[in-house]
Amino acid sequence: MLFNIVKTDGNARACIIETARGKIETPVFMPVGTLGAVKAVSPDELKEVGAEIILCNTYHIYLRPGHNVVSSLGGIHKFMNWDRPILTDSGGFQVFSLSALRKIEENGVHFKSHIDGSMHFIGPKEAMDIQSLLGSDIAMVLDDCTPYPSSFEYAQESLERTIKWAAECKGLQKTGQALFGIVQGSLFDNLRRKCAEEIVEMGFDGYAAGGLSVGEPKEEMHKMVYFTAPLLPVDKPRYLMGIGDLKDVLVGVEAGFDMFDCVMPTRNARNGTLFTSRGRISIKREEFRSDRKPLDPDCRCYTCRNYSRGYLRHIFLSKEILSMRLNTIHNLHFYFNFFRDMRKSVIEGNFTEFKSKWEAIL
Amino acid sequence: MLFNIVKTDGNARACIIETARGKIETPVFMPVGTLGAVKAVSPDELKEVGAEIILCNTYHIYLRPGHNVVSSLGGIHKFMNWDRPILTDSGGFQVFSLSALRKIEENGVHFKSHIDGSMHFIGPKEAMDIQSLLGSDIAMVLDDCTPYPSSFEYAQESLERTIKWAAECKGLQKTGQALFGIVQGSLFDNLRRKCAEEIVEMGFDGYAAGGLSVGEPKEEMHKMVYFTAPLLPVDKPRYLMGIGDLKDVLVGVEAGFDMFDCVMPTRNARNGTLFTSRGRISIKREEFRSDRKPLDPDCRCYTCRNYSRGYLRHIFLSKEILSMRLNTIHNLHFYFNFFRDMRKSVIEGNFTEFKSKWEAIL
């Protein structure tokens, strides 16, 4: 995996990540394909809106259909018919947030499936084995995602596990799969700094900030984003995990992060909330009943080129499957346009204006 | 609307219907776009599988979003982004089968919406006005769909309404919209004959057999299909309403019918039942868990070109929206292939062999 910085504007960066499955221009948004499908759209549609890399959730795929099944079906790319890069998370975050029961030990986590209640164990070795069998382009180390709020003592104890597990994962990295380290440390500056130092020392292909956007106030999160980015090497990709509200993305890019993922554009689409150049709209609204205009007059996506607000309102209220798809195409197109324009603003040296303009709209 | 018989094989016919929005090669299958969308697929996908005409349900669109809304959004074609022919039913069938309360009078039907319980009335004038505002290429007369079983007396009384309403609809036909008459008469030969005579006398652009596949035994239905077809003019399209099980389609084509519609391929797809050249399969089955083969090795549809049974099983069980779409594409592709091959067999004079071959598989 090669990484080149094309241009910087303050701490904001426009970079290129080159992988065996194609190049990724950053800042980049990664749509979430939880179970091996980005909800409501096809791989062709993802390409059409401009997706260069997607994220899949190891926890979900491990439970269903199972990483061995995916492997026997040719690996995650062939499985889901997506030939561009895929990043897999380690499963840690979902274990912590979804499992009915979880018991954290020094060597990993015992947890109960949210689907059938069966018992499972994931440690660094399991996380690496699963991701290796899936065959993702970028794997993530298993981390202990510290909940909010946590005491300093608990955060420190949790951090020690994150560091220990990172070292174990690093030792198990296979050729041909990039591996990113993760910085935890809750909202404590010195824990974040300590974790970053230790993780960076291990030498990963990229670095992520985890444990943010887990319930803490926005200002606290933003403070920690600005604090963490400079702790990470300049010459490697920086990934702000699970953050994709565009206001937060602007903060992340300003701080120097390159990669983002979030279910927001796809989940909002399915709930009828759509992003436009004039702000969000809810397609349910009565005023759209006989509205012949497209969702966003400035948008050139498939949905806006072919359908009126009136039709989109009707199929949303009628719960047509096509509604979820057309809305998702629109929201993803909006996101990718936003990211392209943001990258352009970095290259042209006017990211600050871009940020101010969009903060007023979002 | 022009109609030409290209070739016959026994009573089976291969014809061409020419409309202002394009030609239709028969025997033709019309996918059902109940609410202005064929469930789970886009108009582009419908074209890719070979759809030349679709059916929309007047009753459903009348209730939601309302024919006036569709009209103000540019008519049904622009509304749903489908520029090929559309046939609308009259709403009669759904009024009879879906409404909680319906009161049939000489002039039409009072009924209660299945959505919000509001009261409505549809008579011949309303049915024609609604279809005219929708702007479909082919409208259907309002008929009184006789339930099964019915006494001779009731069937006769019901038939009188069908004939009276047909005449009224005929008098209200607008230029630019074809209008098909409907033959009712339950399972009584002499009622079917009487109805056909009267309806044909009125001179419609095409003729349909209605009131079949409403609960009667298959053999009775087939008998009536063979009985009714020859009562209809040779030089006009013949439409066997609501029938689309392929075994019944073979009977319909053998009898001399040209047009068919049914929710079967789309509904089955959403339930995970898929048509293949070796018979139906349920994608849920455990044996498909790690199966790398496509649904049907002989199929060249988008789904079979790109996805394994293992993946399709996984996304079906995971309730991914993409599952409904990929399954629907496959089933519709299968149907359209079947219809194309059937047409070819008529043209080549071996429809009988085609029918025997498929009766063994279906």
Image (cartoon, coloured by chain):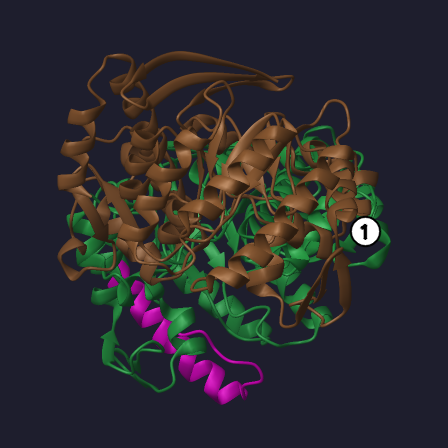
Chain colours: A brown, B green
Left or right: A273, with A196 as reference point:
left
Describe residue A321's horizontal placement relative to residue B275 as left or right. left
| Local secondary structure at mark 1 | loop
| Residue type at numbered disc 1 | Arg
B71 lies above or below A105: above
The residue beneath circle 1 is B289
Q: Does residue B160 show up magenta in the picture? A: yes
Picture coordinates of residue A119, whole percent (x, y): 77, 68
Q: Is residue B345 above or below residue B269?
A: above
- In the rendered view of the protein, which quadrant contains the N terminus of chain B? top left
**Residue A246, image x and y in percent?**
30, 41
Circle 1 chain: B
State the residue in front, A327 or B258: A327
Is residue B77 in view from this perspective?
no
Q: Which residues are magenta?
A: B144-169
Per the picture, the main secondary structure of the magenta-coloured stretch is helix
The residue under the point 19% across, 26% down is A352
Q: Is residue A259 visible?
A: yes
Which percent across, then down, holds residue B177? 28, 45
